[in-house]
Image: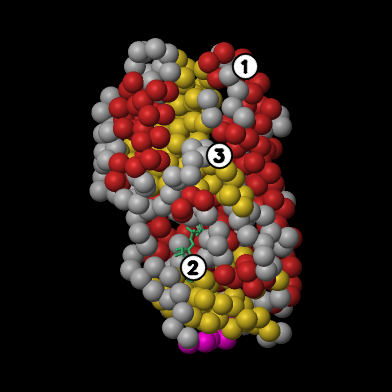
Amino acid sequence: MRGGSIAVVGGSIAGCATALAATRGGAERVTVFERADAELRDRGVGIALQSDRYNELKDAGYVAPEMPWAPLTRRVWSVRDGEAANGRAIGEQPFPFRAYNWGSLWSELRRRVPEDVDYRSGAVVSAVRPDDEGATLRLADGHEEHFDLVIGADGYRSVVREAMFPGVSAEYAGYIGWRGASADIEGLPSDGLDAHNIVFPGGHCMIYRIPDGTGGHRLNWVLYTAPPQTDGLHPDLRTPTSLPPGRLNSELTDHLRTLVAENFPPFWAAKVLGTPAETTFIQPIYDLAVPHYTSGRMALVGDAASVARPHVGAGSVKALQDATALEAAWIAGDSWKDVLERYDSGRGAVGSAMVTLARRMGSTQVENTPDWSAMGQPEFDAWWQDQNSGSDRSSGFGGHSLKVK
Ligand SMILES: Cc1cc2nc3c(=O)[nH]c(=O)nc-3n(C[C@H](O)[C@H](O)[C@H](O)COP(=O)(O)OP(=O)(O)OC[C@H]3O[C@@H](n4cnc5c(N)ncnc54)[C@H](O)[C@@H]3O)c2cc1C
C-alpha cells in the first residue's frame, strides 16, 4: 500500500517509531503532533529492554548499538536482614536486559525520524472526528486537518482511542511507582551488572544502573507500593495522574521515606534516600486493554493501545514492536482495510496477553506479597514460575518474540 497522508498523534517512543514505520511503509506525507513544546522532558530514568527482543528490533532497524546502554545479566531479590549491608538474597535469576536512559533512547529514535516527516512540537490534538475517508484532527488552537489515516501514539490517556472506543480508558491498579535516579553509584555489587529487587511486605523496589547520557552512569530505581489511604492524600492521587518532580506532597514523601528506612537493607536505603527528594516523581500504575488496535481509518500503538504494569519489563519493547508490525502490514497490504486488519490481528492478542501477565505479576509482587523472608532459592523459583505459568519464554516476560505469531 503506497501513498496517503498519515497523522501520528504523540511523538514519544511509539510516535517516533511509528513515523519511521509509516515512511518505510510507503506513506506519502507523515505529520507527527506532539503536545510537549520542546524536547520531551527527560527525567533521567531507566528503561530496560530484554536482549533477545532488542536483537529482533535491531534487525528490524528500530534500535541500534550506538544508543548508549548498560548491560544487565542477573537479577537478585533481597530482603532486609538486620544491619547486613546488602540484606539477604532470597533468589537470583538470569536477567539478560539492556538498560537505557529514557532520554537518550528517545533522542536516538527522534534522530531516526526521516527529515521529510513534519514533526510538530507544541501541537495538542483535542479531538479526532472519523469519517469514511479518514479522520479530521482538531487542534487545541482550533485549527483542523484531515488525514487518510490517524495513528494514536498518545499514551495511556489517548484522544485517538477515545474517538475509536469511547469510554475505554486506563484503570488505576491501586498502587504507584515512586521513581528516581541517583548520581551515587559507589560500591555497587558485581560492578553494577546485577539488577536488584528489594522486597518488603506490600511491594518491592527495582534498582539498576543506567547510562547518564554523558558517558557515565546513574542508579535508576522504582518502588512499587500502595499509597496510604488517608484523607490528606494529594488530590492528584485520588484521581491518578503523574506527579512530576517537586509536586509530591510531604505526607506521601514522608511515608515512602519511612518505608525505605524501615524495610531496605542499609546499603540500598542510603542509595534511595540519598536521591534528592525534589527530583523524584510518582507514576500511578494502570491496566488498559482495548477490543481492537484499529477502528475505521484509525489505529493505536504503544501505551495508547495497551498498558501492562511495568513488572513485565516490556512496554517500550511492545511500542517499538507495534511500529514494526505496522510497517510489515503496510508493505503487505493492498488497501487501507487490508493493512489495518493485518495490523490488528497481529498485535491485539500480544497486547492483551501482556496485560494479563502484568496483572498477575502486580498481584503477587505488590498487592498480595508472599512472606518473602521465609523464602530461599527453591521457594523463590517456584513462586516465580507460578507467575509465569511455567517459563519466562512462553509467558512474555520482557516481551513476546516478534517471530512468534
Ligand atoms: C514505572 C514504570 C517503569 C517502566 N519501565 C519499563 C521498562 O523497564 N522497560 C520497558 O520496556 N517499558 C517500561 N515502562 C513502560 C514504558 O515507559 C512505556 O510503555 C512506553 O514508554 C510507552 O511509550 P508511548 O510512546 O506509547 O507513550 P508515552 O511515552 O506516554 O508518549 C505519549 C506521547 O503523546 C503525547 N500526547 C499525549 N496526548 C497528546 C495529545 N492530545 N496531542 C499531542 N500529543 C499528545 C505526550 O506528550 C507523549 O509525548 C515503564 C513504565 C512505568 C510507568
Secondary structure found at label 2: loop
The residues bearing labels 1 and 2 have C-alpha atoms spaced at a distance of 44 Å
Query: Disc 2 marks which amino acid?
Result: Gly
Q: Which residue is mark 1?
A: 379
Disc marking residue 10: 2
- Residue 50: x and y in percent read 52, 41
Identify which residue is drawn at 47% across, 19% down.
Answer: 79
- Residue 3: x and y in percent read 59, 82
Q: Counting residues from the N terminus, which is met first, the one under dot 2 or under dot 3?
A: 2
The CB of the residue at mark 2 lies under 8 Å from ligand 1:
yes
User: Is 205 covered by the magenta stretch?
Assistant: no
User: Is 145 covered by the magenta stretch?
Assistant: yes
- Residue 321: x and y in percent read 58, 55
Q: Which residue is mark 3?
A: 311
The residues bearing labels 2 and 3 have C-alpha atoms spaced at a distance of 24 Å
- Residue 27: x and y in percent read 57, 78
Identify which residue is drawn at 52% across, 31% down.
Answer: 203
* Location of residue 345 (image quadrant): bottom right
Query: Disc 1 marks which amino acid?
Result: Glu
* Location of residue 347 (image quadrant): bottom right
Q: The magenta stretch spans which residues?
A: 143-147
Residue 187 or residue 241, whichever sits in front: 241
Instruction: Tell me how the rendering is colored.
Output: secondary structure
